[in-house]
Each structure stands twice: as C-alpha cells, then as structure tokens.
Image (cartoon, helix red, strand yellow):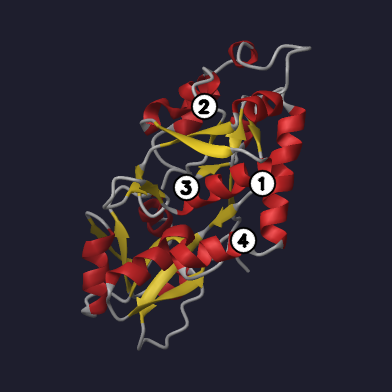
C-alpha cells in the first residue's frame, strides 16, 4: 500500500534540511488556514486510482475512504474539498510546490517525513493481518504459528519479506490478492497476509467464504494528513476537525462503510 511502497522513505531521506526549508511558510506569512478559508476550499492531493481509498466510480466521480475523510474534514473547516489527482511519484513535490494544501492518500507518519512535512493526528492505523477461511477454526495469532503451514502473499510486497524472515513457513507468492484469495478459498493454502486496511475490503468484495484473521503483533503504522510546515493555526484546526469526527463517531462510520471494521483506532 502507499504507506510503505514506492521508495518514499528513500526520497525523503535524500532531501536536505536546507531544501526542505525552502518550502516552509516564511516567518510572518499568513497561515494556510487563512488561505483555505478565504478560498472556501481545501485543495486535496490524491491519486484517484487506489481503491478502496480513492478511485473513480462508474459515474467518473472520485470515491473512497480517503475521499470521504477529506470531505468530512473540509466540512468541519467550513469549506469544500477540492481534489487534485496526481501520480504517486510526484505527489510530495506537488504538496511542497503548493499545488494543493494537503495529501489524503494513505500516507504513513515516519521520522524522515516529519523532517520535511507536518502531519495531522492519525485518522487510520495500519498493521499486518491474516486472512483465513470462514470454516477454519485454527487460531493463528502470529507468523510463528504458521510454521509448517502454507501462507499466501503478493510477490514483491512488504509482507512477502516479513513472512520470509520466519523460517518454517511454506510461503506461496502470487501476482496479487485475487489469486491468493481464490487459492485460500479452495484450501490450497492455509492463510494469506495483507495490510489491515485492505483485509476488510478484500474479504467484503471477494464474495468468497473468507474472514479476517488475527492482526499480527507489532507497531501500528499511523496514517495521517501531511501539509507544509509553518502553519500552526492550520495544524490545530485539522487536528480539531479529526477529533470532532472521531468523537461523534463519523470516522468509525466511514471506516465501517468501506472495510466493515473500524480502522480509525489502533489495532488491539
């Protein structure tokens, strides 16, 4: 998923502090919150090609979990959400160049990214999660529990590398989720592994006798909204908007709509 793929960490590590400083709001300049409210719109950068987070529906309108979150946050700020679709490879540069105000596209908080961007509080939490057959009552709680069993993963994914680090797992790699889900339903493998944020959607849309399994032990990745540094009033307003949406249950409802589970709080 976009929280962990396509080399963002390496890209941001390569950026120097002096370059990052070029894109910060100059001292004495108006806060981004003023500009957003004056324009009456929050410009949101996203790919628009990453279901179920952001994609175009049959009517060619943007839809998805990130789209719904962005609209809800903008409404709390008293403005509308205005979406700007951008390829993943250039989305960070677009934010730094001011082509949009925020990114809502499954961006995980990392120390390297914090060096050049500010982040909201998290609105979703990612973690590795198993998928099992509905009739399979075995309690796989960790990768160690899968020693001697067949585990399906996508070739080249982070989860492929994670599973390879545990000796004894009979690892089966696939081009993508549809292939390993079919094999799992057909009992050719014992479990599959993917991101917590994707598992609910995959199980919901696959129309196969599958169920979400255990969330594996380990730190959650925090998914949040990045924006340019030097905008304290905007940062406070974004965090307050998310807190209000969390408190009144709106975030949980949006999560359940797309994933059938609440991914807006850390996995337990």
> Reading the chain from its start, which is encountered first: label 1 or label 4?
1
Quickly name the residue at label 4.
250
Whether pointer 3 and pointer 2 mark residues with C-beta atoms closer than 8 Å, the reply is no
In the foreground, 193 or 19: 19
The reply to whether dot 1 and dot 3 touch (C-beta < 8 Å) is: no
Instruction: Specify the quadrant that holds the C terminus.
Output: bottom right
Provide the residue designation for mark 1.
76
Label 4 residue SS? helix
- Badge 3 or badge 2: first in the primary sequence: 3
In the rendered image, the vertical position of residue 22 relative to residue 267, given as above or below = above
Q: Earlier in the sequence, mark 2 or mark 1?
A: 1
Label 1 neighbour load within 10 Å: few <14, some 14-19, many 20+: some
Query: Residue 245 falls in which quadrant of the image?
Result: bottom right
How many discs mark residues in the rendered view? 4
With 251 as the anchor, is 261 left or right in this view?
A: left
In the picture of the structure, the residue carrying the numbered disc 3 is 67
Residue depicted at x 27% and y 52%: 155
């Amino acid at each position: 998923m976009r929280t962990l793929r396509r080399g963002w960490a390496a890209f941001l590590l390569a950026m120097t502090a002096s370059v990052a400083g070029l894109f910060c709001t100059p001292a004495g300049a108006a806060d981004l919150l003023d500009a957003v409210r004056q324009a009456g719109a929050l410009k949101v950068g996203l790919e628009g090609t990453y279901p179920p987070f952001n994609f175009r529906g049959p009517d060619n309108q943007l839809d998805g979990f990130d789209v719904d979150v962005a609209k809800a946050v903008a409404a709390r700020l008293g403005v509308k959400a205005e979406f700007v679709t951008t390829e993943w490879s250039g989305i960070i540069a677009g934010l730094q160049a001011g082509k949009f105000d925020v990114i809502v596209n499954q961006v995980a908080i990392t120390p390297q990214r914090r060096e050049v961007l500010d982040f909201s509080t998290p609105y979703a939490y990612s973690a590795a999660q198993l998928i099992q057959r509905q009739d399979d009552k075995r309690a796989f709680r960790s990768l160690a529990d899968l020693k001697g069993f067949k585990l399906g993963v996508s070739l080249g994914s982070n989860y492929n590398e994670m599973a390879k680090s545990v000796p004894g797992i009979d690892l089966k790699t696939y081009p993508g989720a549809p292939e390993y889900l079919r094999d799992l339903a057909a009992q050719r493998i014992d479990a599959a592994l993917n991101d917590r944020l994707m598992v609910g959607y995959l199980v919901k849309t696959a129309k196969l006798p599958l169920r979400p399994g255990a969330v594996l032990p380990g730190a959650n990745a925090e998914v949040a909204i990045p924006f340019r540094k030097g905008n304290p009033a905007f940062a406070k307003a974004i965090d307050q908007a998310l807190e209000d949406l969390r408190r009144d249950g709106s975030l949980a409802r949006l999560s359940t709509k797309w994933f059938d589970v609440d991914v807006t709080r850390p996995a337990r």
